[in-house]
Amino acid sequence: MEQGLSEEPLRGEADSVHEVLEGADTGRVSPIDRLTELLQEQSLFRDADQSQVIAAIGDAEVLVLQPGDILLTPGSQNDTVYLLLSGGLTAHLDSGSPIEAAITIQPGECVGELSAIDGRPVSALVKAALNSRILRLPANLFWDRLMVIPSVARNLLVVLADRMRRGSTAIIAAQRKQIELNYLLQELDVARQLQTGMLPMRSPMFPERSDVEVAGMMEAASAVGGDLFDAFFVDEQRMFFCIGDVSGHGIPAALFMARAVSLMRIAAISIADPATLLERINDQLCSGNDANMFVTLFCGFLEIDTGRLVYSNGGHLAPVLWRKGRSGELTLPRGTAIGVIPGISYLRDEVILDEGEILLCFTDGVTEAHAPSGEEYSESRLMAQVEDNALHSLDIVLSEVRKHVAEFSDNRELADDCTMLAIRRQRTAIDELIRDGRSRDAA
């Protein structure tokens, strides 16, 4: 019978060429004239006496492989030469590079002849790329019967030389791609360092101040991310802060993020109204935005001495506001994402952030993290974590939330950037509460 393969290397019986010819009229295989035509088309048998060729290979087996079936595996012993009659094979070479080097085996070419010659293990993974018919030639048949035909021996050298050239070209191409990949990875590492340097990653962010506590973190889903956060003082008692999420991931999002951060830092120095600030940033990011990227932004100005918080929103998620032992959503004015439509207006709102109250801003990489079941982490779980940890320092609040998100998602890789920014007024006024909370935890 003709035999196909699945996951294991070929190790079965098949019909001989004579049996195939005799059974040709059963419809199981090609007619005699078609098989003869196939042999004449093979590079190995070009210009050879076809009667000599058929006499030499009469006892050989004809094998049939389906796409994906494996013929030879690296490290296995082999004493057989395989001649591809029709279809296509691929040989996957070990180039010493993580990038795969592969060459296509065309009808008329042989595989396995080198391991059959020197007795060394097979060095390449050979499998069918198409429905393929293969002539299985044991070493003694190949060398004692076929290679004594001068034109066949000459053709073999030509076929081998051509395949060796293609193999060398494939290996060189794979190594060149690996060099390019290594260079790209180095550039990504530099980009990651530059991006990290743009964001205020230390926590707490203003350790020299006793009247406000601010902490932030950003964990990118890829080498570089598109989330952003920032906080800085425009004067002694007024702090600007923001959080945002750029569409997409990777280098394009990181570049757009860097542009947004730079523009906001410049604008916040001269613009005191957050809605006006977003309007300017929106117009600037719309200009030259051929990639049609956008960023959701929440920003505000906090007066530290009074607690007055004036804020505006450009399509971002509502922050969590913890007060009087309970968490809830901060009421947000409507606003379109930044960088989409030039010339639009944004609204402002304000609230008093009392002593000890916490404002936690976040991106959807936190609340939309998925459990293995597909369930989202959700705002309700985030609020519960804030309530459970509110009496700790803000860096602990953020680390506990991140830990809980990781446990919820079974510690899988992030699907989206995970970013948080937390603000609490009058750190000194709640030091005793924090110490009491820690004492209760220790007890």
Image: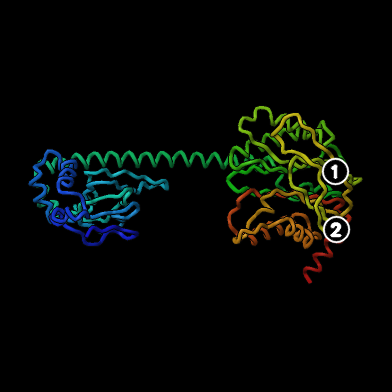
Q: Residue at x 69, y 31 (%)?
A: 285
Question: Closest to the observer: 130 or 413?
Answer: 130
Real-space CA distance between mark 1 and mark 2, rounded to the nearest whole angstrom = 21 Å
Report the disc number at residue 302.
Answer: 1
In the rendered view, how is the structure colored?
Answer: rainbow
Name the image quarter holding residue 153.
top left
Q: Is residue 146 above or below residue 234?
A: below
Q: Residue at x 26, y 41 (%)?
A: 163
Q: Is residue 50 above or below residue 367?
A: above
Regarding mark 2 in the picture, which secondary structure is present there?
helix
Q: Residue at x 31, y 53 (%)?
A: 66
Residue flagged by tag 2: what amino acid is it? Asp
Residue 176, image x, y percentages = 41, 38
Q: Callout 1 environment at 10 Å: few (<14), some (14 to 19), or many (20+)?
A: many
Whether residues under marks 1 and 2 lie with C-beta atoms below 8 angstroms apart, the answer is no
Q: Earlier in the sequence, mark 1 or mark 2?
A: 1
Left or right, 423 with reference to 92: right
Residue 117, image x, y percentages = 19, 52
Disc tally is: 2
Question: Farthest residue toward the bottom?
Answer: 443
Question: Farthest residue toward the top?
Answer: 288
Residue 209, image x, y percentages = 83, 47
Q: Quadrant of the N terminus?
A: bottom left
Q: Callout 2 environment at 10 Å: few (<14), some (14 to 19), or many (20+)?
A: some
Question: Farthest residue toward the right?
Answer: 306
What residue sits right under mark 2 in the picture? 431
Tell me if I can see residue 389 in this picture: yes
Name the image quarter holding residue 348.
top right
Left or right, 203 with reference to 3: right
Residue flagged by tag 1: what amino acid is it? Leu
Tell me if I can see residue 118 in this picture: no
